[in-house]
Amino acid sequence: MSDKRKICVVITARPSYSRIRSALKAIQEHPDLELQLVVAASALLDRYGKVVSHIVNDGFKVDAQVLMVLEGENPVTSAKTTGIGLMELSTVFDNLKPDIVVTIADRYETIATAIAAAYMNIPLAHIQGGEITGNIDEKVRHAITKLSDYHLVSSDRARERVIRMGEDPEMVFKTGCPSIDIARVVKEDPGPNIDPFVKYGGVGEQVDLSNGYLVVMQHPVTDEHKQAREQVTETLHVINDLGLPTLWFWPNVDAGSDGTSKGIRSFREIYKPTNIHFFKEIPPDDFLRLLIHSRGIIGNSSVAIRECSYLGVPALNIGSREAGRERGNNVIDVGYSREEIRHGIEAMLERGHVEGMAIYGDGFAGEKIADVLAGVPLRFSKKLTY
């Protein structure tokens, strides 16, 4: 019987995988740890790229799959999906009997992981706590912080916030974000650009990438979900009018994503843009390679704030989704109107690539996280400092 410490990591969505992949590898290779991997929610769904396929292709064994996403992509289905996840993950944890559960960031599915582990007296480690973004994500992130026993944060400011929330400073570890580990590898060896059309298909014209191109990833904002279709349509009009070759990526499964998706499909049918190619999902390495060779990213994805700040890739951040998040000098912030977006893109293109900034880590977070998980005392009772 193995005496290795069992570390159960729950991946619920496309961004969660890039936020944890290097740590999965480090846990898998650590002599004192045994990786248990649970894949759930939209990470299992084909319409969001079926991330589980990339996970398996990367050499990871999936110990359990949890189907939990209800159709609708609105606040009601988000709440109900969380409830289903809580019930299903409790059973999974009871079967796997992990020593530590790891949950990632701030998605609504991740709070189901945190609640299940906390009520089952399983020590909980949280990655990316202490950050600010506004809307429901911030509420979820801070709630998970209070449910967690170990805090694996990305920056000095994040560590300070977690400690100010009353958490034991000895259990708050600045490891950096594992997504920066992937960015470091790509930055050190960007290589030739990939051909995304041959490798990943997608829908739309096969635009010419040889003279530069834009990348767009725009998600719905959960507390503005009723405006999701209108917001993405404004961006679509600007990109179409500019005529620059563009690679556009599908939104996350958040409240409002149905409106965002319908906006994209309707625009595609009515205007038939010849300069935009649409993709469901591309693995983290190739996605970052596309970014580093691009002229910039547009939308409201955290990759523009986190990985692109490290890579120095120009970014136009639209709207409120990333409000309050620490950002580098690669980011320009604008509102949702066509005029603001158009002017913002012009300014972004004029600025071009900038010097990268290591706000979210030095590119070695995975190894640090594995070492922390191997060494922390196993406990699920709080030592509060207030």
Image (cartoon, rainbow, N blue to C red):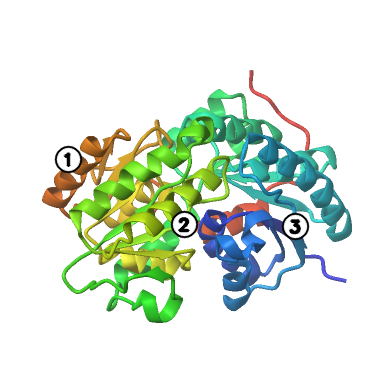
Circle 3: is it few (<14), some (14-19), or many (20+) Cα within 10 Å? Answer: some
The amino acid type, in three-letter code, at marker 1 is His
Q: Which residue is mark 2?
A: 250
Task: Determine the secondary structure under disc 2.
Answer: loop
Viewer-side residue, 73 vs 79? 73
Measured Cα–Cα span from mark 1 to mark 3? 43 Å
Q: Residue 142 or 264: which is nearer the viewer?
A: 264
Q: Is residue 117 left or right of residue 17?
A: right
Q: Residue at x 52, y 30 (%)?
A: 223
- Asked whether, in this view, residue 360 is left or right of residue 252, the answer is left
In the image, residue 28 lies at what x, y percent? 64, 69
- Of the residues shown, which amino acid type is indicated by label 2? Trp
Point out the residue furthest to the bottom here. Answer: 198
At label 1, counting other C-alpha atoms closer than 10 Å, the crowd grade (few under 14, some 14-19, many 20 or more) is few
Q: Residue at 16% of width from left, 53% of height from top?
A: 352
Residue topped by disc 3: 67
Q: Is there CB contact under 8 Å for labels 2 and 1?
A: no
Q: Position of residue 364 (x, y in %)?
A: 45, 59
Disc with the residue nearer the chain's start (2 vs 3): 3
> Which quarter of the figure is the C terminus placed in?
top right
Label 2 vs 1, first from the N-terminus:
2
Q: CA distance from mark 2 to mark 1?
A: 24 Å
Amino acid type shown at disc 3: Leu
Dot 1 corresponds to which residue?
343
The N terminus sits in image quarter: bottom right
Q: Closer to the observer: label 2 or label 3? A: 2
For label 3, the SS is loop
